[in-house]
Image: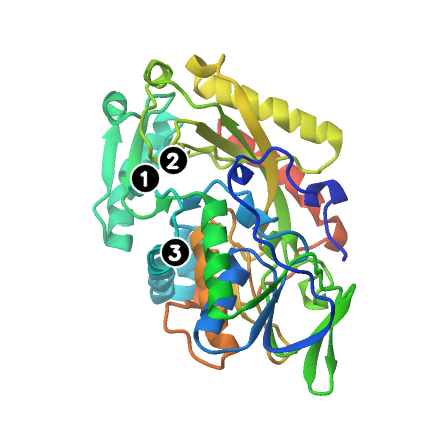
Amino acid sequence: MRRLHEPRAYAAPQACFWNEGVATPDWPALDGDASAEVAVIGGGFTGLSAALHLAEAGSDVALLEAETPGFGASGRNGGFCCLGGSKASDAMLRKRFGPAGLAGWHDTEKAAIETVRGLIARHGIDADTHSRGETILAHTARAWQRLRQEAATAGAAYGVAPELIPRAELGAHGLGGPFHGALTLPLGFALHPRKYHSGLARAADGAGARLHAQTPVTRIRRAEGRWRLETPRGSLTAERVIVATNGYSSEDVPDWLEARTMPVQSTIIVTRPLTDDEAAAQGLTSAQMAYDTRVLLHYFRRLPDGRFLFGMRGGLTARPGEQAAISARIRRHFHEMFPAWRGVEITHEWSGLVCLMANLTPYAGPVPDMQGVFAGLGYHGNGVGMSSHTGRILAALARGRAPETPWPAVMRKTPKRFPLGAHRRMLLRPTYFLAGLADL
């Protein structure tokens, strides 16, 4: 496999809170040669959703995961099932796809949340769901003015009634901190990503999907009118293939993926459970999932057991020195934002890869010049809902059907390649620097 980052970036997280108390599904490795109607590469939310929907429709489907189940972003994310999936602004999307295209994207953001809600309900998944939508917290007075101006537009775009909370009322809503106001959109919810992933795995297995772990695909090639996926200990031959590897993709599986993704690191810390007095001392007692208005944003929420989760961007590389610097920086940011918790123990810290695209939009569709091969990737840090929804779209496409769920033009645009190829991470340092200046 040929990947962009250092091997350390693809190592198993050593202190991920989500791993505690959740058994990793036991998927056997693929030994020898096998066949299926549809092969799915990648065992995260996208791949499991695709495999589940295919199996429920009666397709013979086999899924190949390179590592252990939930190894990638699906087992490391912050658990925000919310609006998002694109880094392109509404103005950019309107210019590219017109008003109808923008409206179609907004409909899809909402549909992605409902896809997850429906899967949880239909399969009885206990995923520790909570939070009434998502709250955006203004980090400056100027950002608060922008939120106030954007509230009506956002409400109309998503067909909901937004709630504006001025600075003086934040404490009464349990949102104490260095914020100048807040906007809540009542769409989405928080969940435990590992429990959701395990529930999807049980459902897919129960529907008849064959799930394999420790089975990296090293090559995809055409053989006798079918696709042959080569692995270290065998092969899987299939009529159609779904590539669902997202930020953990190999640049050459298939070759089309080369330079089409920009995996970047995000880092999360989790505290020990806070007492009621400690939460009250900071004034942050709400269970709302939230993020601030910075370009290089912070995202955070209280977990059902009283712990506090806090995340932000990670290092530009996975080298030990940069990782140590990020570890110190996330603690500094956390303590600056929530000074009452300086003495609260941080029990867990881990990093994972978020997948950015040059188009700034996710993709779900066919791989050009590879008939019967489809790909879904590029959720820009908001993948819980959009990845699950993308898997549903890809399952329909792999069956030769038009998706019954929203599949907007925004997601059909074939992603272009980043400049600089294997050296494209060089683009991140000036981008992060300018974003940091904009956040002042």
Looking at the image, is mark 1 or mark 2 earlier in the sequence?
A: 1
Residue 398 image offset from top left, x and y in percent: 52, 76
The mark found on residue 230 in the picture is none
**Image position of 162 (left or right of 188):** left
Q: Establish if 415 lies above or below 306.
A: below
For discs 1 and 2, the disc positioned in front in the rendered view: 1
Q: Outermost residue toward the left?
A: 161
Q: Establish if 389 lies above or below 439.
A: below
Looking at the rendered structure, the kind of residue marked 1 is: Ser
Looking at the rendered structure, the kind of residue marked 2 is: Ala
Residue 47 visible (yes or no): yes
Q: Quadrant of residue 104?
A: bottom left
Which residue does the image show at 32% across and 37% down from the upper left? 147
Q: Residues within 10 Å of mark 3 (few under 14, many from 20)?
A: many
The mark found on residue 116 in the picture is 3
Disc 2 target residue = 290
CB atoms of marks 1 and 2 within 8 Å: no
**Image position of 19 (left or right of 385):** right
Figure quadrant of the N terminus: bottom right
